[in-house]
Image (spheres, rainbow, N blue to C red):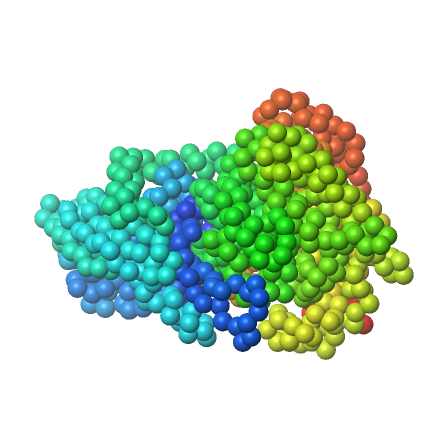
Amino acid sequence: MITHPAYAVEPWCLRETALNLDVLPQSESVFALANGHIGWRGNLDEGEPHGLPGSYLNGVYELRPLPYAEAGYGYPESGQTVIDVTNGKLIRLLVDDEPFDLRYGRLVAHERVLDFRSGLLTRQAEWTSPSGRTVRVRSTRLVSFTQRSVGAIAYEVEAVDSETRIVLQSELVANEQLPAAGGDPRVAAVLESPLVPEEHAAEEGRLRLVHRTQRSGLRVAAAAEHRVDGPQETKKYSKCSENLSRFTVTTVLRPGERLRLEKMVAYGWSGVRSLSAMHDQVDAALAGAKSTGWDGLCAEQRAYLDEFWDRADVEVDGDAEIQQAVRFALFHVLQAGARAECRAIAAKGLTGPGYDGHSFWDSETFVLQVLTCTAPLAAAQPLRWRHATLPAALKRARLLGLQGAAFPWRTLNGDECSAYWPAGTAAFHVNADIADAVVRYMTATGDEVFEREVGMELLIQTARLWRSLGHHDHQGEFHIDGVTGPDEYSAVADDNVYTNLMAQQNLRAAADVAERHPDLAAEFGVDDEETAAWRDAAARMALPFDPVLGVHEQSRGFTGHQHWDFAGTDTDRYPLLLHFPYFDIYRKQVVKQADLVLAMVLRGDAFTDEQKARNFAYYEPLTVRDSSLSACVQAVMAAEVGHLRLAYDYLGEAAMMDLSDLESNTRDGVHIASLAGTWIALVSGFGGMRQCDGVVSFAPRLPEQLRRVAFTVQVRQRRLRVEITDSVATYTLVEGPELEIEHFCEPLTVTPGRSESRKVPGLQEPPEPAQPAGRRPAHRGWAATRPEPDGPA
């Protein structure tokens, strides 16, 4: 999209200077507003034309059947799908009885701007109706970070060239007609009119609709309040029905006169609260918003974001596109989790229905990594949600004959939703990913209340799973067999290195926390024998290594498999899973997304520098990046082993995933984890930031295209600013007591009010490894004539 001439490259906003209906669905995703509780896609105010209408509440879903050709023990019986809830965005405009529809008449000008600093989506349009009446339309939309149940719109229409009769219809609409949902009629049936009406009201500018989902039994309420400013003769009236509540404003505007409508919308949902309670809840939220007023909501939004950017901004000199992209990314990551409050962060956030609105392991591994360093309170909430779903994970483990907790690979409410068990149930690494996020959060914040209330039980129950899932062989080595790691092109494998290393960390962390809190550990039934068993399993964890090739095996026996025929695979046959049977893919050396390389990023302490370089060189020609989760990981490791130009290219791929629609599915929502990966590639990649055993270290190096990168991170209850050029790294403690860090393995003490600068060692880049034929990342303007390395034989 950003390559389209209608999209400008600017440091603090995303601006669209002309409306292109061909990319309307994608623009609805990138212009979406959310706060972790409410999500509004960036649909046009008048509702049509649209690519995909979308109003979402975090945690609101409908149940759907999971069909199986052959039944099997332990298969999930039903799945969950996010649904489009009551649409409160709609404000329809009629100009002398003609609908304001951009497919008709003449669109003189049209611009939309998503401002990352104000949190506002603004729109300006000048349109001449088929009968020749010209109007200017201005709208501003927000989803509040400070009042989590509230969204608001200010809509203004101005007559330009003649006296014009104007009608505005502000609506709440439930059960909107949606585009066909793929090829499965059962899913379509679930999504068609999923809301059962329970209450509707409209009086004096106050609208309300209350519905209940048919199968999941969730009650959803929406209400709206209006303020009108227009000519004296302006008239207003309201009407409602089961799925529609409407407030209508009519007036006549003379040239230069304006009609302004301010609309505040409140949402609420619950699986247990009564109809009257939900009615009262949204009315109360509206009362709070009304007392704040439109200007007050905008001021609160700006103040919230000022504080966020003060602790989270990343400055990039030398690549204006990356500068815009990383702020776009941080803004959407914040929108996904800011007010989630004991709810999950979905793979698409609240920007679209992609992946059925499910949360995966990438929330903990990618998104929470960013939030922990930039907005720690937001990082805690999805982990509290995981803790709230612990009973379902414990039950799932019992069903599988295991101890502890077995968290789902994909879910909305805590129950496993994957009908394909090799990619779902067998992906046990999600347990260790959750544990890793817990440890990262506790280390960064020192939140002892969280540790005792949430973190400790999560670490204990996930550790118990590993001890029961794995086993010691006759030589005492500990193995975890029959699992699927992050690479979904290698399923049900033995001793996946990523899984084993993350499980090892999980086991040690559980033992450590039990020893820190023996009283609480006893309540969970943990004794010295159990912690000793955890430590023994961690100490003897199997890590397959091929001594002939001198590299770690992604899983036991992986390097002995036949190589995929990359040279014989046309570029239009990617992603492979859509063009080849899994049976064929599973037997070959081909990697969907960084797996062993991700292990080296998250558990770098388990590898030597030489091993990292050799492993990266071996797996790079095998990794096809059929997943949006891969590029940022490869960027980090490429930077660490010295391939700065390649790392820069991978940064570009992660950063432009949605702005350039690289996966061709941005229409279904943005890729929250890849957006988080933009920050990770810059901070962990070129900033070289690592945290291990409580030590924060940096090994920064920039590619020649970037003159400067600066960022601020939250580290152990302190705020640290890091500024990097090609020759110097400067560390400034912005907030908190003195901090011990490392710069290229040398200890450094940073004290408040004083900057510490250190030289960045020079680097001779090693020979760059190849990628699969046709799958190298796009170059970002460096050495454009340099030939592409040959792919593997």
Question: Can you give x and y, in whole percent of width and height, for residue 601 in the image?
Answer: 71, 48
Residue 366 or 215: which is nearer the viewer? 215
Residue at 72 percent across and 67 percent down: it is: 590
Q: Is residue 557 above or below residue 436?
A: below
Extreme left residue here?
233
Instruction: For the C terminus, give its image quadrant.
Output: bottom right
Question: Can you give x and y, in whole percent of width and height, for residue 191 in the image?
Answer: 38, 65
Residue at 24 percent across and 56 percent down: it is: 198
Asked whether the viewer can see residue 265, the reply is no
Residue at 59 percent across and 35 percent down: it is: 523
Question: Can you give x and y, in whole percent of width and height, for residue 583 in the image?
Answer: 68, 74
Residue at 23 percent across and 64 percent down: it is: 99
Horizontal side, residue 342 vs residue 236: left or right: right
Asked whether the viewer can see residue 428, the reply is yes
Extreme right residue here?
548
Q: Is residue 400 above or below residue 455?
A: below
Residue 676 or 517: which is nearer the viewer? 517
Q: Is residue 410 above or below residue 38?
A: below
Residue 425 or 251: which is nearer the viewer? 425
Horizontal side, residue 674 vs residue 761: left or right: left
Count of residue discs? 0
Question: Can you give x and y, in whole percent of width and height, for residue 232 in the image?
Answer: 11, 45
